[in-house]
Amino acid sequence: MSFKGIYAALSGSMAQALKIDTIANNIANVNTTGFKKDQQTFGEYLTAIEKNPEVIQVPKISASMTSFYDNNGTDKSFVDSTGTYTNFEQGSLKRTDGKLDVALDGEGFFEIATANGVKLTRAGNFTIDNEGRLVTKDGHTVVVNADNQESAPQDAEEKRNSVAQFSGTAQAYISDAGEVFDGEKKLGKLSVVKLNNPEVLQKVGGSFYEYKSNMTPDVVQMKTPSLKQGYLETSNVNIVAEMTDMIMAQRVFEGTQKAIQAYDQMEDKAINQVGNTKG
């Protein structure tokens, strides 16, 4: 006797556990500057009964109780995790009055040069390091395009060297147009790019994104990005909605656990009671 339905319940349990982890991460980053919430997407594994007969690929083996061909694939059904989706909806803007704080009000990403290559971020809480360079809170170089550049640098090494060098901190500020100033001296303009296919991005920690290796990004340098100086973009996580989703996911998880227990008890009876019954 076989109770293959336990696999469907188990896959549902694993799917809800994954969803709970994702929601928990969203809640943990509710106060993270520029954070974009993630969502899990799931689908049902298509069994053979839902397909046309001509596309069914099953081996024609001798009939048996566990034969996949005997069941024509109808016993194969489970929840399939199709991936993680990042919601890039705009977060609200919070006023800070910081001279080096800047928020993207609309599309775009700041380019940041790190030791592991150029990354993208929505977090505009910049500062100046001990060497007088414009950097992120973690010390990574903010890419700034010089005015005398005919076009934005494309090479990673060139971008790493495209840095604003300040003589001090008192007169350093960034304008609403993304222009970086050291007093009256203009050092350049923040490098902001737009992706026509944002699905190529993946999170790599520290509010950074990078391009997926198996996809080609469609990147456009934004000449006039919509910025707000003295503001920061907050997380787009709605704490009430996330808590509601968390409660629902936990209830579904508990339901799948009960289903697993029920299948386990049925199989136990089939083995230890029905199997030992003498005719």
Image (cartoon, rainbow, N blue to C red):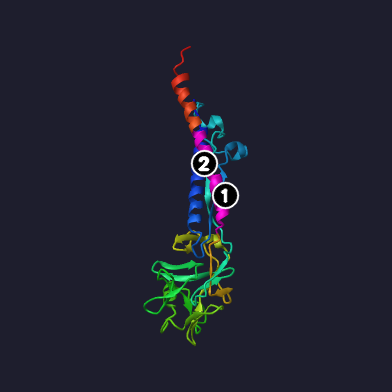
Q: Magenta residues?
A: 237-260
Where is residue 242 drawn, in percent x and y?
Answer: 55, 52
Can residue 212 be seen in the rendering of this structure?
A: no
| Mark number, residue 256 | none
Q: Is residue 54 left or right of residue 201?
A: right
User: In whole angstroms, how far apart are the C-alphas of marks 1 and 2?
Assistant: 14 Å
Above or below residue 148? Residue 270 is above
Residue placed furthest toward the left: 130
Residue 244 circle label: 1
Q: What residue type is labelled 2?
A: Phe
Under tag 2, what secondary structure?
helix
Residue 232: where, in percent of width, then height?
53, 69
Above/below status of 47 relative to 226:
above
For label 2, the crowd category at 10 Å Cα-Cα, with few meaning under 14, some 14 to 19 and many 20 or more, is: many
- Amino acid under label 1? Thr
> Is residue 248 within the magenta segment?
yes
Residue picked out by circle 2: 253
Q: Residue at x 52, y 63 (%)?
A: 216
Res 48 quadrant in image? top right
Residue visible at 50% across and 41% down? Answer: 13
Where is residue 105 drawn, in percent x and y? 58, 70
Residue lying farthest to the top in this orientation = 279
> Where 199 sits versus 227, above or below?
above
Mark closer to the observer (1, 2) = 1
- Residue at image position (48%, 74%) is 154
The residue lying toward the viewer, choosing from 112 and 183, is 183
Q: How crowded is mark 1: few (under 14 residues within 10 Å), some or many (20 or more)?
A: few
- 246 part of magenta stretch: yes
- The image shows residue 81 at horizontal and vertical percentages of 52, 47
Residue 77 seen by the camera? yes
Q: Is the magenta stretch mostly helix, strand or loop?
A: helix
SS label for mark 1: helix
